[in-house]
Amino acid sequence: MTNYVLQAQDVAIHYGGVKAVDGVDLTLEKGQIRGLIGPNGAGKSTVIDAITGRRKLTRGQVSLLGQDVSALGVVERRMRGLSRSFQRTSIFGQMTVYRQIELASHKMGVKDSAADAEAVLNELELWSLKDSPAEDLGYGEQRRLDLGLALVGRPTVLLLDEPMAGLSVKESLDLAQHLKKLTSSWDVSVLLVEHDMDVVFGISDVVTVFELGRVIASGAPAEVRANPRVREAYLGSAA
Amino acid sequence: MNLKKSSLGAVLALLLGAAVAFGITSSTLLSLLTQSIIYAVFALGVGVLLKQNGMVSFGHALFFGGASYLIGILLQLQLMSAELAILVTLLAVTVAAFLIGLVIVRVPGVAFGMLTLAIGQMFFLTASRARGLTGGADGMNIDWPSRLFGFPMSQMLKPATMFLVCWSTLVVVMFLLAWLMRTRFGGITEAVRDNEERARFIGITTLLPRAAVYALSALVTSVAGVLSAMNTGFVSPESMHWSLSGVALMMVVVGGFKALWGPAVGAVVYFMFKDILGEHATHWMTIFGMALIAVIVFSPTGVAGMFDRWVLGKKPSVKVGGH
């Protein structure tokens, strides 16, 4: 039997009669990157919200390292190792880069929060900007800082919501390499929602395709890319 | 500003206060300066709430007048020494504000402002009508003992001494706030203010820090209330009226809320307008209103922002919240 670090079973989020997500099953193995793709409004971000506790489940269960965390709030899930980034850059604009990373590290209960902050900032090549207010950084640097906030405290699972949005091709590739490296060096598993197909198919171990709140395909990248239903629903003939 | 610089600034400010107290011989001028310093502490309380929580209160006069009333009632009842009564007053206001804060800081933006207004006016009306306890609309005299903290009250109430007491209190409160903002608590409140959602996702429970800042701002404002009770020996319901909260807010806007000293400067500017311009123009408030509009349009960060831009060369930033 596989030991999943994250397991979402029969997850549903309904808004009245609208089924934003309906009966989704997802798993993540240790060190795995699972790409989540699908057209806008397919329910990808809602699934991340459901897993992290930002939205209340209508039905289903979320387990982290075999423990049911469905009843826990956002803060408790984060403390247990379930971390995320947002579609829009979500940082503390008026705080310096170092202060916010160190604060996050302290709040996550890391004993040597200064060392942890330094490690995160070095990993994301932001150490040289440590004394700059976050609002003064370039967009790409802010996206990396956003990722840094999600990385403090060495989470078990990282849920990334379009981390490449708005980045240049080079910045996207750099960030993708960072992510791939993190799964082995930081022992973190990643659920990646992204529209950049080159990145998703380039770094994911498995890819899941969403349409209208449901999973329509899941498997190895090559297998998913070749799936006629996926090509018709999302990738198009050019894929 | 680091702690060393803050300490040096505080020592210099205390020396400046001593020089003013002993250098100015006009009792009237010293009394006016004392009044402006008391309001500077009041405005500082309102400013802290805006700076650390990004919230605007229209009801902080509640804590200003409330502290004056509470100290007055405690002294009237003669249940404890005046020194202990001051401590009890400050603690009671802080605890009450924290409990109120736990409920109202959940509400964002204008709704929060309206709630503070409603709560403030509720207590204003209570104070106006509870004649037996507060003297009603006539107000109440505050019976200070003959000695306070070992000093004769007659000495304390001399204009130079009173100015020095109020000035020193302002400096100490500002120093303590500057220190507090540099601690972990300051970082947490900044994070919650900048981006509450992200704060939750780095493990911060966001309600308590917001309520704590609200209580902290009430504590600072209540210090002003106690100073006012000492200075005038009298309190009336007007000291709890919403218009007084509005005046404090104007001081914060004029002085700027980004720097801790901004609201204090705003209070001094307000009293300069009131006392100097008021001598020559009946409707001085109209002129102050125009000055207020000019500040909001041309320098939203107030006098402190202008200083930062023109003297220190810092870039402007008026954001108080995240997205």
Image (cartoon, rainbow, N blue to C red):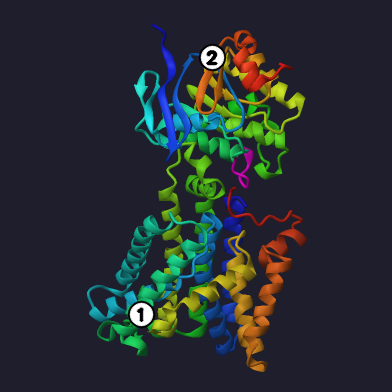
Same subunit, labels 1 and 2: the answer reads no
- Residue A135 locus on image (x, y percent): 67, 44
- A98 left or right, relative to A52: right
For residue B99, which quarter of the picture? Answer: bottom left
Check whether the beta carbons of the residues at disc 1 and disc 2 lie within 8 A of each other: no
Kind of residue sitting beneath label 1: Leu
Return the residue nearer the eye: A65 or B82: A65
Residue A188, percent across and down?
A: 52, 19
State whether the magenta stretch is mostly helix, strand or loop.
loop
In the rendered structure, the answer to whether residue B82 lies left or right of residue B19 reads left
- The amino acid pointed to by label 2 is Ser
Q: Is residue B166 above or below residue A178?
A: below
Indicate the position of residue B114 as horizontal and vertical percent values.
46, 67
B59 up-or-down from B259: above or below: below
Q: Is residue B251 above or below residue B132?
A: above
Q: Residues within 10 Å of mark 1 (few under 14, many from 20)?
A: some
Disc assigned to residue A218? 2
- Residue found 53% across the figure and 85% down from its top: B31
Residue A33 found in image quarter: top right
Label 2 marks a residue whose chain is A
- Read off the chain for label 1: B
Range covered by the magenta-colored residues: A91-97
Identify the secondary structure beneath mark 1. Answer: helix
What mark, if any, has residue B125 been given in the picture?
1
Q: Judge whether residue A122 can be spotted in this image.
A: yes
Q: Is residue A199 magenta-colored?
A: no
Which residue lies at the image location 42% right of the left edge and 40% below the top edge? A16
Locate residue B113, reporting x and y percent. Answer: 48, 65
Residue A62 is left or right of residue A121, and the answer is: left
Q: Nearer the viewer, mark 1 or mark 2?
A: 2
Q: Residues within 10 Å of mark 2 (few under 14, many from 20)?
A: some
